[in-house]
Amino acid sequence: MSNEPRNHGKLWKRHEKRNLIRLSNEGVVLKDLAKQFERTENAVQRMINIIEIEKIIKRREIKHLVHFTNIQNLDSIKKYGILNVNYLRHKTNIDFDYNDSKRLDNMLGHISTSISSINRFLFEKFKSQYKKKKWLVIEIDPSIMANGEASFFEYNAAHHALRPKNPEDWIERRKSKYLEGMFAENVMGYSRDEKEKWEPTCVQAEVRLRQIPLSKIVSWKEIDDN
């Protein structure tokens, strides 16, 4: 006989989500929430976090994430979505070109995206470094941030103060407070002055994703930046 709660693995219904947030806001502890909803504590905690992320997306009026890449990758992206470099290297025969051949951050299992607009600082660096490349900007449905696997960084994720050192660090960075932290009044000396509500405080802020399925890609276009 299984020891798993009765609702383990089942989809959450809309009214269950509403009740979960209401009870959580009233101060009901995680153990009691898990008992009431007949789910594991991890499942309850994960759903609370997902709902909080969805609320931030709505409140901030975030319309899309963006990712830029070599236009040569478009054909494979139209077939498979956006895959991380580790997966492309070891589990596919797809011919691909990636932006940073050095990748000193060693985060090849994650894809870098930005909220609302591309990381102009990084784009200018690559455009100068690879003058013959043509670039593509891809818009991504922001709901992907609520898939439970997105990690949030208020500044460049490779920065020594932010770079995850182990799997637990990546999991910690999935919390909604780190998404909210991307819109703090001050981030690494960057101010929110003249920022729209959907723009992160720092242009180098990142949302790291393990993969981006084709179903989450909204549009793509060549960057005409001459």
Image (cartoon, grey):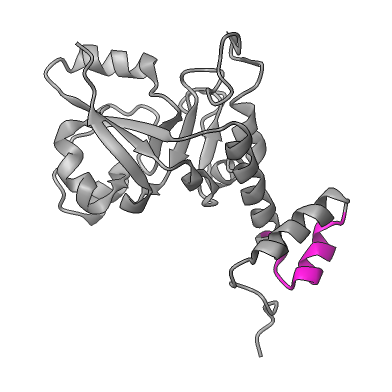
Measured as percent of width and height from the top left, residue 169 is found at 58, 41
**Corner quadrant of residue 47:** bottom right
Q: Nearer the viewer, residue 157 or 67?
A: 67
Query: x, y (%) of residue 71?
Result: 17, 32
Q: Is residue 121 left or right of residue 44?
A: left
What is the magenta range?
Answer: 28-42
Residue 52 vertical position relative to residue 131 in the rendered view, above or below: below
The verdict on residue 91 being magenta is: no
Instruction: Give residue 184's position: percent from left, percent from top.
Output: 65, 21
Quarter placement of the N terminus: bottom right
Q: Residue at x 13, y 44 (%)?
A: 95
Q: Considering only vertical position in the picture, is 210 above or below 5?
A: above
- How many marks the image carries: the answer is 0
At 54% from the left and 26% from the top, the residue drawn is 198
Query: Looking at the image, which residue is at 59% across and 68% down?
Result: 11
Q: Residue furthest bottom?
A: 1
Q: Nearer the viewer, residue 205 or 88?
A: 205
Residue, x 69% and y 52% (percent of image)? 48
Is residue 69 left or right of 47 when viewed as pictured?
left
The answer, for residue 165, to whether it is visible in the render is no
* 107 lies above or below 212: above
Is residue 58 visible in this depiction of the protein? yes
Residue 35 is inside the magenta segment: yes
In x, y percent, where is residue 54?
60, 45
- Residue 191 is left or right of residue 208, and the answer is right
State the quadrant of the C terminus. top left
Q: Main secondary structure of the magenta part?
A: helix
